[in-house]
Image (tube, grey):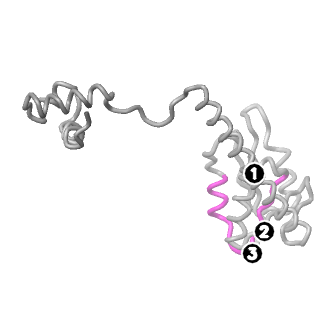
Amino acid sequence: MSLVGYARVSSVGQSLEVQRDKLTAAGCEEIFAEKRSGLETDRPKLVECLRYIRKGDTLVISRIDRLARSAENLLSLARQLEDKGVALKVLDQNIDTTDAAGRAFLGMLAVFAQFEADIRKERQMDGIAKAKTNGVKFGRRPRLTAEQETEAVRLRTEEGWSIQKVADHLGISKGLAHKVTSRGYT
């Protein structure tokens, strides 16, 4: 059962020393530190830290924003820690998941994370609806226009062209030419 620290600063110009000092003073035996933006999903030292910690350990951070970039991200990391049997301690916000208040905080965080996700989804759906009313089309463009499909069927049925010849003429694959002409679109 050891205390393991994680420190992160967002830019190269910032110093990790203040966080390292706090983590050392808190009794951390091992400290993983990196200079990376919290917006980056690739944080190698955090990944290394999460691999290093074991059941019964406590992950110590100076502030919540050093670990996660959103409530949803923090909740995901907290669940990973809980699944491993690892506690989370946040020094500046006085949060410790080994006590009831810390666990309650994470419970509230779960509610806010879900709320955040719901709001984001709502905004996305509103944006899609607005775009559709403005004539924006979603999804992949059709490989052939209706006219090209009609032409493919005509060339195959009326002109007796081979599927390969239809494909070459329209600049499509033989498989697509077969699919279009066998559907019988007119």
Comes first in the chain, label 3 or label 2: 3
Residue 100 seen in render? yes
Residue 56 disc label:
3
Observer-nearest of 92 and 17: 92
The amino acid beneath tag 3 is: Gly
Q: Position of residue 186 (x, y in %)?
A: 25, 33
Against 93, residue 88 (above or below) is below
Q: Quadrant of the N terminus?
A: bottom right
Q: Secondary structure at mark 1?
A: loop
Q: CA distance from mark 1 to mark 3?
A: 19 Å
Against 79, residue 35 (above or below) is above
Q: Position of residue 47 (x, y in %)?
A: 62, 55
Comes first in the chain, label 1 or label 3: 3
Residue under circle 1?
A: 67
Based on the picture, tell me whether residue 143 belongs to the magenta stretch.
no
Observer-nearest of 138 and 64: 138
Comes first in the chain, label 2 or label 1: 1
In front: mark 3 or mark 2?
A: 2
Q: CA distance from mark 2 to mark 1?
A: 14 Å
Where, by quadrant of the figure, is residue 105 drawn?
A: bottom right
Residue under circle 2?
A: 87
The residue at 23%/31% (across/down) is 172
Observer-nearest of 103 and 121: 121
Where, by quadrant of the figure, is residue 13 drawn?
A: top right
- Residue numbers of the magenta segment: 46-62
Against 99, residue 110 (above or below) is above
The amino acid beneath tag 1 is: Leu
The amino acid beneath tag 2 is: Ala
Q: Secondary structure at mark 3?
A: loop
Label 2 crowd (10 A; few <14 / some 14-19 / many >=20) = many
